[in-house]
Image: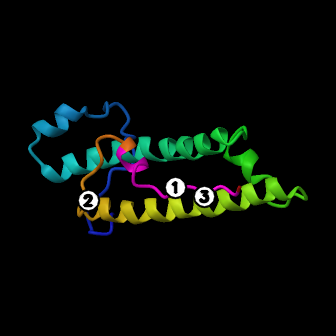
Amino acid sequence: YDNLGNIVIDYWNVPGVPEPTYQEIMDLGTPQLEFQYNLRTFYLQFAPFIENYIDSIAVARGYGSSLYCLSYINSSNTSWLEDAEAFNEWRDSVWVYIEAQQVLIDNQTRPIPTDLSELTSELPVIDWPD
């Protein structure tokens, strides 16, 4: 159940019954099923998209990935340490914002984004050290 008490379809696991298509769900004329289908589709794409976005910020700074950047959090090299600290703080702020948006989407007070890049334009901007 979601926080509104609605049944949520997290995955389809009905032996011998294929998962319904978007059109089949729409043909049922049930707005809540449509919302649940769209929400499930959104969340399946959402986390990998945000993780890739976060990685792209680290890569643009010259690190192989976010994990490589964060691995310098205890570095004795001041420059790398400061990058890792700034990146860690920024990444946390991104996920705090994302979690707040998820609550709005789940409560249907914010529409489900049809284009995930909409969210990246709303995210905090990293402030790399000089």
* Residue range corresponding to the magenta coloring: 118-129
Can you give x and y, in whole percent of width and height, for residue 75 in the image? 87, 57
Out of 63 and 103, give the one closest to the viewer.
63
Tell me the distance, in whole angstroms, between the alpha carbons under discs 2 and 3. Answer: 28 Å
**At 20% across and 49% down in the image, what residue appears?**
33
- Disc on res. 125: 1
Q: Earlier in the sequence, mark 1 or mark 2?
A: 2
Tell me the distance, in whole angstroms, between the alpha carbons under discs 1 and 3. Answer: 6 Å
Can you give x and y, in whole percent of width and height, for residue 6 in the image? 25, 63
Relative to 46, 104 lies left or right? left
Q: At numbered mark 1, what does the secondary structure look like: helix, strand or loop?
A: loop
Out of 73 and 42, give the one closest to the viewer.
73
Kind of residue at badge 1:
Val
- Disc on res. 127: 3
User: What type of secondary structure mainly makes up the magenta span?
Assistant: loop
Q: At numbered mark 3, what does the secondary structure look like: helix, strand or loop?
A: loop
Tell me the distance, in whole angstroms, between the alpha carbons under discs 1 and 2. Answer: 22 Å
Relative to 128, 101 lies left or right? left
Crowd around label 1: few <14 · some 14–19 · many ≥20 (10 Å) = few
Q: How many marks?
A: 3
Report if residue 121 lies within the magenta region.
yes
Look at discs 1 and 2 and give the one toward the viewer. Answer: 1
Q: Are marks 1 and 3 in contact (CB under 8 Å)?
A: yes
**At 34% across and 42% down in the image, what residue appears?**
41
The residue that label 2 is drawn on is 110
Look at discs 2 and 3 and give the one toward the viewer. Answer: 3
* Colour basis: rainbow
